[in-house]
Amino acid sequence: MIISTGIEELDKMMDGGLRTSFCYAIKGTAGSGKTVLSLFMTLGALKAGIPVLFISTEVDIEKLMIYGKSFNMDLDSYVEKGLLLLEKMSLKPMGTNLVQTDRFDLSAIIARTKNRMQTINAKMIIFDSISAFFAEFKYEKTARSNFMDFIREITNEDAVLVLTAESRMNEEYSTIEEFLVDGVIKIRTELKNNQLIKRISIPKLRSAKPINSENRFIINRDGISILRSEQPPVSIIHEESSGIEKLDNLLGGGIPSGSVVLIEVDGETNYFPLFLSTLCYNLEKDKGIIIHSNVHMYSSRIIEDFKKADCDIEPFMNKGNIVFIDKYNRSVTAIEAREMSQLMTTDDMISVTVELMEAFQKSNQKVVVYGDLTDDANILSESEFLRYFALQSFNIKEKRAVAHSFINFNAISREMLARLRTTADIIIRFSREDYTTYIECIKSSTGATFLPKVVKYKEKIPLIEIVD
Amino acid sequence: MSLKIILFKSPSCSWCPYLEGVLRHIIADSDHLELEIIDVSKDIAKAEEYQIVAIPTIVLPNNQRIIGSADEAFIREQLDFFLTLGS
């Protein structure tokens, strides 16, 4: 049985939630929010109708209720319903004096806890905190080793046991609790720019991959919200070949998935050899191709050019792996296009592209998008054009696709080019001097840029060769 | 007037039979002390009432508690006040 922690983001971090017959430890420095977190976990279970036994070793039950109220928790109502039982358990009840030896076990607290569990049929037991509990023992080591019996006996009852434990500042080593428990939720508070920032991580999680990266979290009256990770888990960058070996090598292995490649050309440079070479390669690799066709880039021209290179791409096109999206009518404005209803606006273009990307990905195909931006830059207003490019780029990154966007840099303003360059992950620039064409990479998300290299055009695929 | 000393024990506690023997031996010599033995596995209510955590626990009439087992000399030392009381 999996019990939600009551905090959606924490459930995700913990592979769905807390598992019965598992023991978890909430570790944190003093004042980091261990008790509050355990109270919110209690509330999460109670809301799902799961009975909870809350054992407090430190704070009196009355104080705990007041504490709960300060976070808008109506614990009383759950006590009345018989879903919640709060119990103070400590070695030294108020007013008693202790003489201790090291020859003891913890069978009394085990028996008492089991008895209380049976009273309400508790499936979640919170023990707040083991640090305060052990602090009362003169022979702490004996208490800690006997506590293993407590963990075993309680989790054997098909219940979740959550312990809170105080960790010391800069604690580098793992304490005994971390070895005993099945999962560790670590919270800490740090002072940054005069602000107290709370962070949460899962350094240990049995049967699932632990999340060592720390997420920020905020505690307020309405609950605990965990913010998205600032340091997401390191994932292996998947690089895709461009179809031109030399270009891949120069780019440090290929084009990473989720990249927007801006290819800058002047009016005289023909980008088609590069376009067709990568297109042919991606079709052969059974990728899903989306082409935003326009006056330069349209199906019959592409087929004709391939034929000239002794390459027949019609079978690939018939397979349905290549889709042309005809943009809005270039002779009308976006508003007029809306009015004419049958023509696309930029927003339509974006949504259709996303739908197509999703469709390809459903059949496990990687997606490559091609488009010539030059016409868009001329027809759309500057703000509309930049918005369109930014949205398309965002979708490409989200869907881990690759986009090749061609632009005639002579046709747009320097400011606009600068804005496009900011959004793009990789910038490849073609330039010409004395009848020689050069290719260079002036920006790369992986850092692998390269200086101008001579480009030679060839008759057959690949139609482009980069010469050192 | 007799004073009650309570020993909390459990079946899993390996030191309890010895400690019980020690206590019985000490109490036998005293006419104003009385020993009550509670097995927490059978009488959980008493364990709740006295908020017992560790076993064995000896609860003395002056709110003092002895946690853990020990030899007779140690126990006698702790009970000294009660043993001499009234004698």
Image (cartoon, rainbow, N blue to C red):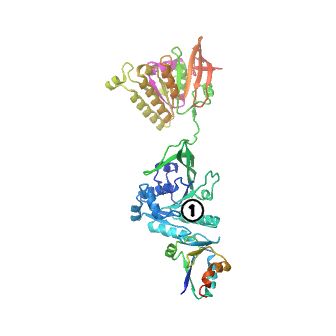
Q: Is residue A303 magenta?
A: yes
In the foreground, A97 or A352: A97
Label 1 CA crowd tier, 10 Å (few <14, some 14–19, many 20+): some
Is residue B29 among the parts visible in the rendering?
yes
Residue at horizontal 54%, vertical 68%?
A110
- The outermost residue toward the top is A434
Which residue does the numbered mark 1 point to in the structure image? A132
**Residue farthest along the left direction in this orientation:** A339
Where's residue A291, x and y in %?
Answer: 46, 26
The total of numbered circles placed on residues is 1
- Using the image, name the chain to which the residue with label 1 belongs: A
Q: Secondary structure at mark 1?
A: helix
The answer, for residue A275, to whether it is visible in the render is: no
Residue A300: x %, y % from top left:
45, 20
Nearer-the-camera pick, A439 or A417: A417
Q: Is residue A44 left or right of residue A337?
A: right
Magenta includes A461? Answer: no
B70 relative to A220 in the view: left or right:
right
Amino acid under disc 1: Ala
**Image quarter hosting the C terminus of chain A:** top right
Query: Splitting the image into 4 quarters, where does residue A167 fall?
Result: bottom right
Q: Which residues are magenta?
A: A282-308
Quadrant hosting residue B37: bottom right
Examine the rendered structure and indicate whether residue A239 appears above or below residue A377.
below
Q: Position of residue A44 (x, y in %)?
A: 44, 55
Residue A25 in picture, x, y percent from top left = 56, 57
